[in-house]
Every structure is written in structure tokens, then in C-alpha cells.
Image (cartoon, grey):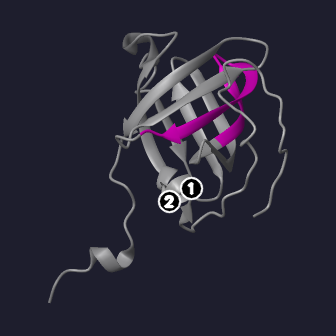
Amino acid sequence: MLRLHDNVRTMPHDGAGPDLGRSAFPGRDTQGGAGTRMTSLADFTGRWRIVSMELWDTDAIDLVEHGFIEFDRDRTGRFGFIAVEGRMDCRETTRDGRTRVDFTWAGSDEGDQISGRGWATLADDGALDGRIFFHLGDDSGFHAVRAEPQPTSKRSRRRPR
């Protein structure tokens, strides 16, 4: 397995540790420690509704539109909450035997250019937990649920004959 940045030092509140940077291969099932099945980047794909954040209440999160974070198959994505809009460049990593998506982002807040980084991981209940960092500013944890059904293959959409 490819190993990048094995002893990475990170910022506080990041939740990252020495496992950050081990590459899991998108689209393949992998095995974590003690036989635990890890997810792949494909499991994150789709739109998620941000239902809570550490720093802001629901009225603030949904100020312009329902807060969301969205991951695309091409390792990009976007998010929006309050008056913040961001476009993401995503990478799959593992931490504590779990797949997570780390991302950098650039966007705007009420027309002002902003940027930052963040991460997201799947919780045991299938929800999405993560943290968004604003460059030289705030950071906030978030909790999100699927806003749409998980994509299915064309084969599973066929009607029985």
C-alpha cells in the first residue's frame, strides 16, 4: 500500500494523526484492522444535508438555502451554509482504520473570497461527521445526513420481467 506523509503534524482540532495520508484505492473494498470493512470514496458520493454545526444554529445554517455538502465522483465537491459557498478538491485517506475524505476548498462568504480545508468521515449510523476550517479564521464541526438516496447501479434499477 502506498504510504504518504507517515508522521504528519497537524493543526489542533483536526483529528488527524499518524494514519493521515495512507492511501486507500477508490472503488475497492479494503480491510482495516481486525477485519473491519472500510468504506471507499464512492460511499461519500452524493449530496448531504448539514443538520447541525458547532458554531451556528439551524436558522443560521439554512439562511440562504438548506446547508449541504456534496461529493462528486471526480474527487471534487461543493458545500453551502449561511452565506458561505465553497468548491472542494477531495482526497481519500484513512484514520483509525476508517476511510475519510480530506479536502481543501475555495469560495466566497457574502462575495468575499475565502478558502480553507476540512475533512469528513462516515459515522456508524451512516451519517456524515466532519470539520470545516476557514483559513486564518473559525472552524466548526458538522453533522450531515443524506439528502438523496445513495446512487445505485444501472443493473439494480432494472424492472423484473
Q: Position of residue 161 (x, y in %)?
A: 14, 90
Depth check: give the residue in front, 7 or 161. Answer: 7
User: Residue lying furthest front in this view?
Assistant: 34
Give, as a single range, the part of the protein colored magenta: 102-123
User: Residue lying furthest left in this view?
Assistant: 161
Establish if 161 lies above or below 156. Answer: below
Residue designated by label 2: 35
Which residue is at a point 57% across and 53% down the rendered structure image?
A: 33
Give the spatial CA distance, label 2 vs label 1: 6 Å
Q: Residues within 10 Å of mark 2 (few under 14, many from 20)?
A: few
Which residue is at a point 67% across and 40% down the rendered structure image?
A: 102
Predominant SS along the magenta part: strand
Assess whether residue 32 is covered by the magenta stretch: no
Establish if 148 lies above or below 110. Answer: below
Residue designated by label 1: 32
Q: Are marks 2 and 1 in contact (CB under 8 Å)?
A: yes
Position of 105 with respect to 79 (left or right) is: right
Which residue is at a point 65% across and 53% down the rendered structure image?
A: 75
Which three-letter amino acid code belongs to the residue tagged 1?
Gly
Depth check: give the residue in front, 129 or 134. Answer: 129
Establish if 82 lies above or below 144. Answer: above
Which three-letter amino acid code belongs to the residue tagged 2?
Gly
Q: Position of residue 56 (x, y in %)?
A: 48, 10
Element type at mark 1: loop
